[in-house]
Image (cartoon, grey):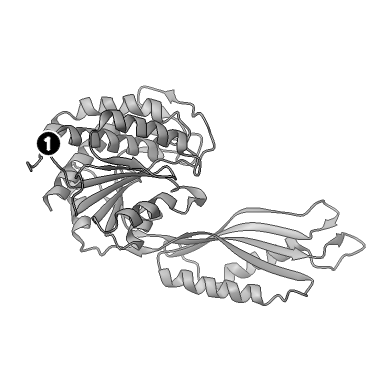
Amino acid sequence: MRSVDPYNTLLEAADRHAAEIFDLLETVVQIGAPTFHEKRRSDFLLGWIREQIDVPHGQDDDGNLWIDLSRGAASVHLLDAHIDTVFSHVDVPLRKTPSQWHAPGVFDNTVTAVTLLIWARAIAASGGNAPFLVTLSVGEEGEGNLLGAHRMAAQFKERARDAVALDLSLDRASRISVGSRRYEMTFEATGGHSWGDFGQPNAIHEAARWIGLLEKAFPWRRGERSFNIGTIEGGTGINVIAAQARFKLDIRSIDPAFLDTFQAWLEQECARQSPGSPFTITSRLIGYRPAGSLPATHPLVDLITETQGDLGLPCEWAAYSTNGNAFIAAGIPTVVTGLARGAGIHTEAEYLTLDSVPTGWRKLVLLTQKLAAL
């Protein structure tokens, strides 16, 4: 079995490969991939992989894709990028300017997934076996609950010695996974007429009081733990005492124990309201992302720092909630970093900065060169 060392060649051809990234990106970004509805994009990428990359690969029922550049090696470095977006578009509009491409999802995370694919094709074409397994996963955004990353982590846990989740921006990295629990909270009361039944419990009023209680129940600290009411609805009319109110609650923390503490507190709060009372609270868990971290002394952390330094890039370490959560929870040492620059993520004004793409290519090549040498 001959070894493969194509990295210097790939670095020298960065501009050519960047052009290949843009060619593929122009097509892929316009194929909508809302969370839970990634199949059309996944099927297109599967067809491209079949035509372009002659190594073992596959697609599961959820739309996750994998490419085994090691051709079955027992120990691999796992490289992951998610292919879903937060937007509901079936067809995504793309607007080009000389320095930017504007499209929902172009920066988060389509350009990164495409860069990883072009890199995988180049590595496979160089011959031999490289110690890498690429996954393109679904269900990272919104209420996807890291569906794809959990599936890929379970499937390849025994072979993955470590993982790099490719997300975020070119200058950022993370070794700390922000955990979260998400709930649908429902408040119910008997309801009635706003004048004739005034004084009866109002589900909206009770929901508002409960939010005030939540604000004071824990010492919420930016960067350590947070809560957010993302949506709220209820009631049937301005002169009707609301019989029901419902909202979605997002709890986040870098400490796994706090998420358990909050769960116990919430269960206690809901239990205070007996089923026969005129007012009840119920909670339903609708999402969970495990918290975790990689030690600052781990070789992967040094590898990212060195790669950024080699390219003259800053390295801004912070805690994030990404596919890295799922891999760390599976016991796979994981860091997260990005391959491009842009802005406006999760908005219709999202854009990719074009001159960051060749630098992102060089970063991926250097990063994988260092990984292969471990």
Can the viewer see residue 238 in this picture?
A: yes
Residue 106 in the image: state x and y as whole percent: 41, 34
For the point 21% across and 56% down, which residue is it?
A: 300
**Along the line of sight, the residue nearer the viewer: 291 or 359:** 291
Residue 174 in the image: state x and y as whole percent: 31, 55
Residue 150, by quadrant, is bottom left
The N terminus is located in which quarter?
A: top left
**The residue under label 1 is which amino acid type?**
Pro
For the point 32% across and 34% down, which residue is it?
A: 114
- The secondary structure type at the circle numbered 1 is loop
For the point 13% across and 37% down, which residue is it?
A: 7
Query: Which residue is tagged 1?
Result: 6
For the point 60% across and 76% down, which residue is it?
A: 268
Instruction: Say whether residue 267 is left or right of residue 112.
Output: right
Residue 264 in the image: state x and y as whole percent: 54, 75
Instruction: Say whether residue 89 is left or right of residue 4.
Output: right
**Along the line of sight, the residue nearer the viewer: 4 or 241:** 4
